[in-house]
Image: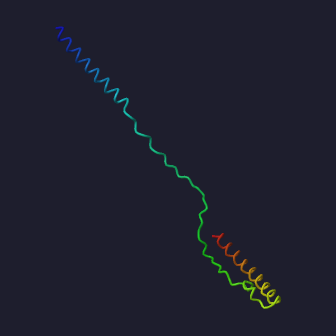
Amino acid sequence: MIFCNDIRTTNIFRAALCSAICITLTACHPTPPPEPIIKTVEVRIPVPTPCPAMVNRPAFADEDLPSATDIFDAARKAKIGLLQRGEYEHELEGALAACKGR
């Protein structure tokens, strides 16, 4: 009878030990990493875009001043070149305003 009692105790001990090991392993099971949180954020960064308004640089009258024959010819070409540059600057400002308005 003592022998039979030892077998029962051993079986109960084995069952308890197996249960304890299973519970311990289940409790120590690594949890999956949390789901990443996807958040949409609007970021305002200026992006350079090509401007379709093109202004061609003209040939100015005063670019060839050394070829002027006398001082009066040089002064006349300088005055015409100054007027041409003013018109060119006006065209550039208009093109710039058209690009800003896009």
Residue in view at x 59 percent, y 68 percent: 49
Quick one: quadrant of the N terminus? top left
Q: Is residue 37 left or right of residue 15?
A: right
- Front residue of 81/97: it is 81
Q: Quadrant of residue 45?
A: bottom right
Residue 90, percent from left and from top? 73, 78
Residue 96, percent from left and from top? 67, 72
Residue 21, compared with residue 91, is above or below; it is above
- Front residue of 59/37: it is 59
Residue 52, compared with residue 46, is above or below; it is below
Q: Is residue 100 left or right of residue 24?
A: right
Residue in view at x 33 percent, y 26 percent: 23
Task: List the single residue furthest toward the top.
Answer: 2
Q: Quadrant of residue 85?
A: bottom right
Judging from the image, the colouring scheme is: rainbow
- Front residue of 76/69: it is 69
Residue in view at x 20 percent, y 11 percent: 5
Q: How many marks on residues?
A: 0
